[in-house]
Amino acid sequence: MALLPILCYPDPRLHTVAKPVAAVDERVRTLIADMLETMYEAKGIGLAASQIDVHERLIVIDVSDNRDQPMVLINPELIWTSPTTHLNEEGCLSVPGIYDGVNRFDAVHCRALDGEGQSRVIEADGLLAICIQHEMDHLMGKVFVEYLSPLKRNRIKTKMNKARREEAR
Ligand code: NI
């Protein structure tokens, strides 16, 4: 297993639209193991392949308290969304230190392949529903800060660029 570098906003590669995973083979299984290790190490609850510069429709999630219930979503599609939405505070491993409110469906049903390549439907609400929507946005090249006002977004860009310059020193 290996830790993978996570792209940081405003890296333009985060805006790449991911392609479907063609087959759940050895390469994909290795990628899943590496993404899970990277997500746990970074103390995140979700990671999309887009964030590690692999532009395929693959997501790992673990919203459990004990960090022992990994979920793998390959080629996920939302097949139902609740009529109600809610404003929730979100963060993202690609935008470290930034948290802000985003409107999401309260519940979703998501069809995806699991890590064995089996098709399943996940009926999610609460944190899992939010996380699935956040990670699926990544696969479409969208980072959560793009829901915020241009003013806020520019402020975040400036802050991220400054942090990167300081890191490079
Ligand atoms: Ni994210």
Image (cartoon, grey):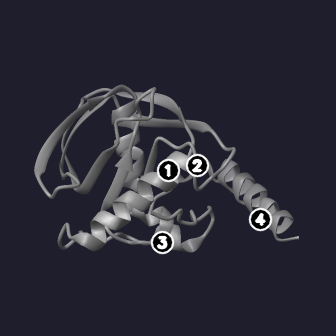
As drawn, 144 above or below 101: below
Question: Which sits in the foreground, 151 or 58?
Answer: 58
Closer mark to the observer between disc 1 and disc 3:
1
Question: Which sits in the foreground, 43 or 144?
Answer: 43
Please report contact status of discs 2 and 4: CB closer than 8 Å, yes or no.
Answer: no
Quarter of the image for residue 74 reads bottom left
Residue designated by label 3: 53
Query: How many other residues sit within 10 Å of disc 3, few (<14), some (14-19) or many (≥20)?
Result: some
**What whole-number distance in Å separates the C-alpha atoms at marks 1 and 3?**
14 Å
Residue 42, label in figure: 2
Quadrant of the drawing holding the C terminus: bottom right
First-in-chain label (4 vs 3): 3
Please report contact status of discs 1 and 2: CB closer than 8 Å, yes or no.
Answer: yes
**What whole-number distance in Å separates the C-alpha atoms at marks 4 and 3?**
18 Å
First-in-chain label (4 vs 1): 1
In this picture, residue 146 sits left or right of residue 123: right
Residue at left 49%, top 50%?
A: 39
The amino acid beneath tag 3 is Asp
Quadrant of the drawing holding the N terminus: bottom left
